Image: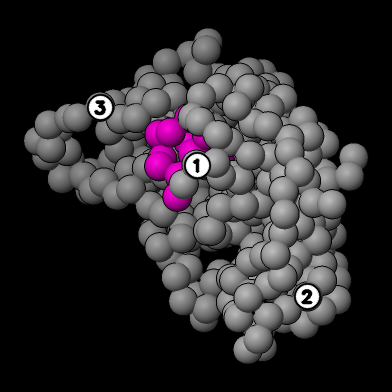
Amino acid sequence: MNHAIRVHQGGGPEVLQYETCELTPPGPGEARIRHTAIGVNFIDVYFRTGLYTPPSLPFVPGMEGAGVVEAIGAGVTEVAVGDRVAYASRPLGAYAEARNMPAHRLVKLPREIDDETAAAAMLKGMTAQVLLRRVTRVEKGQTILVHAAAGGVGSIVCQWAHHLGARVIGTVGTDEKAAQARDDGCDHPIVYTKENFVERVKAITDGVGVQVVYDSVGKDTFQGSIECLASRGMIVSFGQASGKVPPFDLLALSPKSAFLTRASMPEYTQSRAELVQTATELFDVMKKGVVRVRIGKRFALRDAAEAHRALEGRRTVGSTVLLPGS
């Protein structure tokens, strides 16, 4: 019997229903995965609420997980039965004990990385790789600003950017999160509930500003992000935890000749080669200890609604995972 979380209509966490659902044999090009751990991400919230349109109703949310290949369909060459694998891509459907997944979107896990860590790291870690190595290429001597520096992506970005030699400024909501961000290589954590982050960034940089702002918060930070930029700096928007950025006058970027992009990890891992390269680089920094993935909270799969409440309430530090069978 296979269980999954299904959403029949958009809404709050209460629409996440734990149900029995049928699982067909894997079709051509597919592999069936028995999940051992499932990643929880803000994009899951966006689909649950209807901010992002799901493929159909009802649907099973989630696009990140790790587990073991139980069966393969015709023509599958990328993985074999018994392989430990992980993924972070569409189609949706990760909030389930088992699922079928296009085999070309799966990557094999190194023995050094356990399943829970993989499920916590794939989407956030590959997003960090894309932000730091592809959308922009952070180098020694640069100064960057990371919003939500103690969050799942922010924690990895801080560690990785510090390793690359950047000076890292980060915004967080509490002193506890500031301590974690500092431990993750954030040179200047700013508790935005106590300090004006724009004024602090200007003070830290002697008025010059930062070369890059990585902004997953959206509405509440966007205007301030513009003000924090150095001349010809770039805002990399990759989320909207506080809400969508409202329409704005493009001329607001003109005084600094600033750049703005809305980055999406799936667009940078469209091909099998790009996916494998991105995951391999992530696994490499994890195995070397450059990046530590914190799992702040674990929930049983049936308690997915509680996981979403914690995430939306900003009561999480690091990554959150769901555990089937718990």
Contact between labelled residues 1 and 2, with CB atoms less than 8 Å apart: no
- Residue 233 at x, y percent in the picture: 28, 46
Query: In the rendered structure, which amino acid carries the disc numbered 2?
Result: Ala
Query: In the rendered structure, which amino acid carries the disc numbered 1?
Result: Leu
Q: Identify the residue under disc 3.
A: 246
* Residue projecting furthest to the right: 326
Q: Nearer the viewer, residue 22 or 70?
A: 22
What stretch of residues is rendered in magenta? 44-55
Q: Identify the residue under disc 1.
A: 57
Q: Secondary structure at mark 3?
A: loop
The answer to which quarter of the image holds residue 16 is top right
Question: Is 110 placed above or below 206 here?
Answer: below
Q: Horizontal placement of 255 versus 87: left or right? A: left
At a point 68% along the width and 32% down the height, the residue shown is 17
Q: Horizontal placement of 141 versus 115: left or right? A: left
* Disc on the earlier residue, 2 or 1: 1
* Disc on the earlier residue, 3 or 1: 1
Q: Horizontal placement of 267 versus 70: left or right? A: left
Q: Secondary structure at mark 1?
A: loop
Q: Nearer the viewer, residue 51 or 138?
A: 51
Q: Nearer the viewer, residue 41 or 159?
A: 41
Q: Identify the residue under disc 2.
A: 71
Distance between mark 3 and mark 2 Cα atoms: 46 Å
